[in-house]
Image: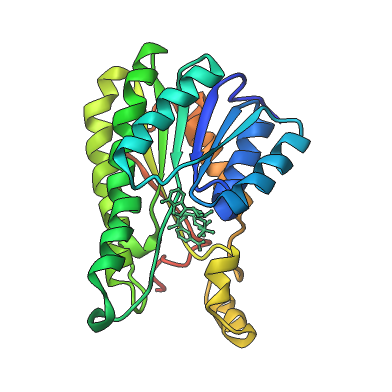
Amino acid sequence: MNARLQDRVCVVTGAARGIGFSIAERFGREGGRLACVDISAKRLEPAVGRLKDMGFETRGYEVDIGRRDDVLALFERVEREFAAPVAALVNNAVFARFEPLAQIAVDTVERMFAVGVHGLIWATQAVVPQMERRGGGSIVNLSSVSAFHPAKDSIAYSALKAGVVGLSRASAIELAAKKIRVNVIAPGMIGTPPSIAQFDEATIATRQAEMPAGRFGQPEEIAALAAFLASDDASYIQGAVITADGGWTVPAK
Ligand SMILES: NC(=O)c1ccc[n+]([C@@H]2O[C@H](COP(=O)([O-])OP(=O)(O)OC[C@H]3O[C@@H](n4cnc5c(N)ncnc54)[C@H](O)[C@@H]3O)[C@@H](O)[C@H]2O)c1
């Protein structure tokens, strides 16, 4: 394994499970120093324990990414505790609900955007001065193919993930001069527990058969892309939206 992130401080939000955990693990294998952020202390503690057992320098931070003051304090704390500025940030945390229009409630949609759009802006504001101090950095934001190819009951989620694309591409333009790259991963169906919990076995089989790849993706496959984007191998990739969906959204001829 190339240690492309050797000694770099890497912040991963929503790192306690699913794609975020896999990204943290992959970054650790690439030599990264891991700051794992999650709202759930119950999930974060064992996740940090597993990463430490794998031999990675890991610290856990129980923070609600939707609260600006807490996010600003988080990045100050990370820099202080690692004694180095942050080199890579993966904005992966999500609060998502899938509901038809008539059922979308004010609280739900406000919470979704607080975590999944506002939180990314606060984290970006907080990390940029640190990345500037170290001469650059990489920000990877998790969107979804739903931004462009909405599924049923995904009005709020599609809006959320389209918002991620917009804020990322606008950030990429503004931050390029500071040598900070901002890119987006748009996964298709990834076999994480919450994403497959919504389906029974027959539906999972049908869904997988619909995909050119014949299967859902694995969190590790998204983690591999995140590691590439965070590394210097992606030095000329700026403002890109990279789909990882096994060909699901390629229109059939
Ligand atoms: N799983 C998929 O099929 C899929 C597909 C497309 C896009 N995505 C995107 O990938 C990312 C990860 O998805 P996942 O399936 O691994 O999600 P998940 O629900 O398994 O994990 C999300 C993590 O974020 C944490 N979190 C939630 N709110 C938070 C907050 N306010 N502050 C800090 N942490 C918080 C949760 O506790 C959880 O550990 C998300 O942005 C999601 O939208 C996932």
- In the rendered image, which quarter contains the N terminus? top right
Q: Would residue 238 be seen by someone viewing this image from the given angle? A: no
Between 209 and 102, the residue placed more toward the observer is: 102
Specify the color scheme. rainbow
Q: Which residue lies at the image location 41% right of the left edge and 73% below the top edge?
A: 252
Which residue appears farthest toward the bottom when viewing the image?
A: 202
Q: Residue at x 27, y 71 (%)?
A: 155
- Residue 30's x, y, as percent? 65, 30
Task: Determine the residue positioned at 60% across, 71% down.
Answer: 214
- 59 or 134: which is nearer to us? 59
Which quadrant would residue 70 be assigned to in this image?
Answer: top left
Q: Residue 156 sits in which quadrant?
A: bottom left
173 sits left or right of 14 in the view: left
- Identify whether 165 is placed above or below 1: below
Query: Could you tell me residue 119's position as x and y percent?
Result: 33, 44
**Residue beneath the point at 26% across and 75% down:** 104
In the figure, 196 relative to 133: above or below? below
In the picture, measured across the screen, residue 13 lies left or right of residue 24, that is left
Say how many tags the image has: 0
Image spot of residue 110 (x, y percent): 26, 60
Residue 218 visible to an observer of this rendering: yes
* 150 or 163, nearer to the observer: 163
Q: Position of residue 118 (x, y in %)?
A: 27, 46
Q: Quadrant of the C terminus?
A: bottom left
